[in-house]
Amino acid sequence: MMDRERFISLKEFENLLGYKFNKIELLNQAFTHKSYANESGLAGRASNEVLEFLGDAVLNLAVTHLLIQEFPEAQEGILSLWRANLVKRSSLAILSKKLRLDRYLLLGKSEILNGGMKKSSILANAYEALIGAIYIDSNFDRITEIIWKHIRSFFLNEKSFFILHDYKSLLQKHIQKRKGDFPQYEVLRELGPDHDKLFEVSVSVGGEVKGIGYGKSKKEAQQEAAKSALKNLGYNHPDL
């Protein structure tokens, strides 16, 4: 049974999160580290470990679903890189800090003295546990909406993430929003000997060339052409 002060604290977090729990006990469990549960003599499943286990699976599935939905033209290799970058420990720790999860965690005294509130592993685990708790409290569609709200800001604000971007997919989405057209790619030239060939590729929109790119393969040159087109079209992107 949580006291009134804890209840008010968790309701404050709900406002920050933008989600109201039907069972707020789930939120309290998501923020209960095993060190606190052990020191407090709580039952075995009172900590957030099981919710973390569930949240890890839900997060991977939801992120996979979102990436395929948002970037339908992206190749499997690119999607795998994006997903790995989004669900890695350091990324989840960043999301936890943005949500200020450290303010609401329950840690044992020894863990607090060891700087547990700032440990990336604890923060990442707490985020996964939060995802697991929301999933149990609602459904897959709702948790997917919440995760997208979190990782969307990561797409927009974390410059390091953009080195993995598929510029062809970005260009297609950008063009379709503006004109409903499709980019057209054309190999202009093949330069150099067969063992060290360089491809020159153009990308056109509405019959007008918007970008030119070079690469050791046609796919690489197309990506560079799409990147050039995005820049020329004024697409606001920190890696252009």
Image: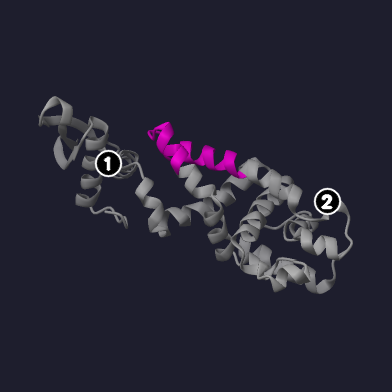
> Which is more toward the observer, 24 or 177?
24
Q: Position of residue 114 (x, y in %)?
A: 68, 70
> Where residue 22 sits: x, y (%)?
76, 54
Res 61 → quadrant = top right
Q: Nearer the viewer, residue 197 or 31?
A: 197
Pick out the residue farthest to the top. Answer: 194
Pointer 1 local density, CA inside 10 Å: few below 14, some 14–19, many at least 20: few
Q: Is residue 31 left or right of residue 171?
A: right
Which of pointers 1 and 2 indicates the residue nearer the eye?
2
Q: Is residue 205 visible?
A: no
State the mark number for residue 59: none
Query: What is the span of residues highlighted in magenta in the rendered image?
Result: 59-81
* Tag 2 secondary structure: helix
What is the secondary structure assignment of the residue under circle 1? Answer: loop
Q: CA distance from mark 1 to mark 2?
A: 54 Å
Q: Is 31 colored magenta in this rendering?
A: no
Disc 1: which residue? 179
Amino acid residing under circle 1 = Lys
